[in-house]
Each structure stands twice: as C-alpha cells, then as structure tokens.
Image (spheres, grey):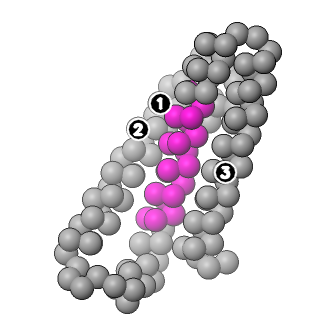
Amino acid sequence: MVTSITSFGRSGLYDWMVQRITAVILAAYTVFIVGYIVCTPDLGYEQWSTLFSYFGVRIFSLAALLSIAAHAWIGLWAILTDYLTTRMMGAKATFLRVIAQMVLGVVTATYVLWGIEILWGF
C-alpha cells in the first residue's frame, strides 16, 4: 500500500483509478478539440472566443486542466519514487525526491492557477 504523504491518493489502487479516469477525460477533451479544429473552416480568434464563451466548454476545459495536473502528479510521483528512492538508497535520495516533488508541485499549482485565470478571467 502507498503510505507516502506525497502520493496523490490514499492507496495505489486509488491512484491507479484516478489515472484511468483522468486519461478518459483527457482523451475525450482531445477528441473534442481536434473535432472542432477539423470541422471549423477558417479557424481564428472569433471562433475560439465563441467556443470558449460557452459555460459547458469552460467546465470541460477546467476538468481537462485538473485532469492533466492529477495525472501528471501521480506519474511524476511514481517516477520520482522509483528512480530517486529505489535507485539511490539513503537520506540523500529521500531529500532529493522531496525537493523535486516540491518544485514540481509548485510548477503544477502555478499552471493550474494560470489556466483557471485564462479560462475564467479572475
């Protein structure tokens, strides 16, 4: 069982489920955006502005943004745990992993807040 405080969920199964759910949301959002690009002739600022003026599109975009953050955090946690803790034993490895997770957490939070600002204009 995952017991690290820096993991996303309460257990490995929970993290696995979150990754699968976020992957489905991201796949659906990708299909939606690619479909819009393909089906919209002369795509420009006016069309993008109109598309993102709809409340449903903003909610879907917010769900995709939060899904990217959750999906990336779980993936990065797994990679950092595997490569910085398993490959390098000791306190130095734990320190490096925690620092890397803190930096990546700040970057992820910044991107999420920036995306919310772009979507909702707060």
Say what amino acid the circle numbered 3 marks. Answer: Val
Q: Is residue 92 magenta?
A: no
The residue nearer to you, when weighing 114 against 58, is: 114
User: Which is more toward the observer, 96 or 64?
Assistant: 96
Residue lying farthest to the top in this orientation: 89
Q: Position of residue 12 (x, y in %)?
A: 54, 24
Q: Nearer the viewer, residue 110 or 26?
A: 110
Q: From the viewer's perspective, is residue 29 above or below residue 88?
A: below
Amino acid type indicated by mark 1: Trp
Question: How would you rate the neighbour count of disc 1 (Cα within 10 Å): few for under 14, some for 14-19, many for 20 or more?
Answer: some
Categorize mark 2 by other alpha carbons within 10 Å: few (<14), some (14-19), many (20+).
Answer: few
Q: Vertically, is 17 above or below 46? A: above
- The residue indicated by pointer 1 is 16
Q: Which residue is mark 3?
A: 107
Residue extent of the magenta highlight: 60-78
* Disc with the residue nearer the chain's start (1 vs 3): 1
Distance of mark 1 from mark 3, alpha carbons?
Answer: 23 Å
Residues at discs 1 and 2 in contact (Cβ within 8 Å): yes
- Horizontal relation, residue 49 to residue 115: left or right: left
Label ID, residue 20? 2
Q: Nearer the viewer, mark 1 or mark 3?
A: 3
